[in-house]
Amino acid sequence: MKIKAVNTILYCKRWQETVGFYREGLKLRVLSSTDWFVEFKLNESARLSVADEARTSIKSGDGRGVTVSLQVADLDELRSELVQAGFEPTPIKLVWGSRAIYMQDPEGNRLEFWEGRAKA
């Protein structure tokens, strides 16, 4: 199997608020958008999408059992930007040999931002 791209889809009850969180709050670039589905670009081969559960057959997990883990180039800079934007990420923690911060989106999905190399 040769995977060319990855898209994680989050099904949400609080769809509009969650879309705003990723679009305006985290300033992710929108690749495509309908009145119930928005696809954001994370990088050249990774996407994160938000779907309105009221318009799908798949329901929200209410933030249970999901962590969106994103490796970033500069964790200190990102944390500072998040705080300036009004978010409350955790203090930086050492996790599996990497530095990480955590926060939740409006749907309750856990976001992990990390830098460094995780130990194999």
Image (tube, rainbow, N blue to C red):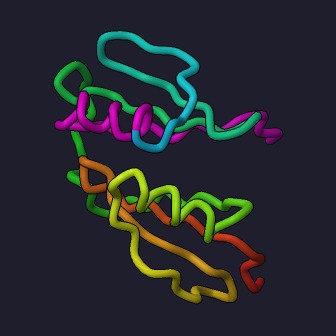
Q: Is residue 16 magenta?
A: yes
Relative to 116, 42 lies left or right:
left
Relative to 2, 95 lies left or right:
left
- 29 to 22, vertically: above or below: above
Q: Tell me how many marks there are.
A: 0
At 34% across and 28% down in the image, what residue appears? 51
* Spot occupied by residue 27 in the image (x, y as percentages of width and height): 51, 37
Relative to 52, 28 lies left or right:
right
Outermost residue, right side: 2
- 44 to 113, vertically: above or below: above
- Quarter occupied by residue 16: top left
- Say which of 43 and 90 sits in front: 90
- Say which of 52 and 30 sits in front: 30
* Spot occupied by residue 25 in the image (x, y as percentages of width and height): 40, 41
Outermost residue, front side: 84
- 66 to 58, vertically: above or below: below
- Quarter occupied by residue 42: top right
Residues in magenta, as a range: 1-24
- Say which of 45 and 84 sits in front: 84
At 22% across and 19% down in the image, what residue appears? 55
* Spot occupied by residue 78 in the image (x, y as percentages of width and height): 58, 60
Q: Is residue 91 magenta?
A: no
Relative to 111, 44 lies left or right:
right
Q: Quadrant of the C terminus?
A: bottom right
* Spot occupied by residue 83 in the image (x, y as percentages of width and height): 41, 62
Q: Quadrant of the N terminus?
A: top right
At 21% across and 52% down in the image, what residue appears? 62
- 24 to 101, vertically: above or below: above
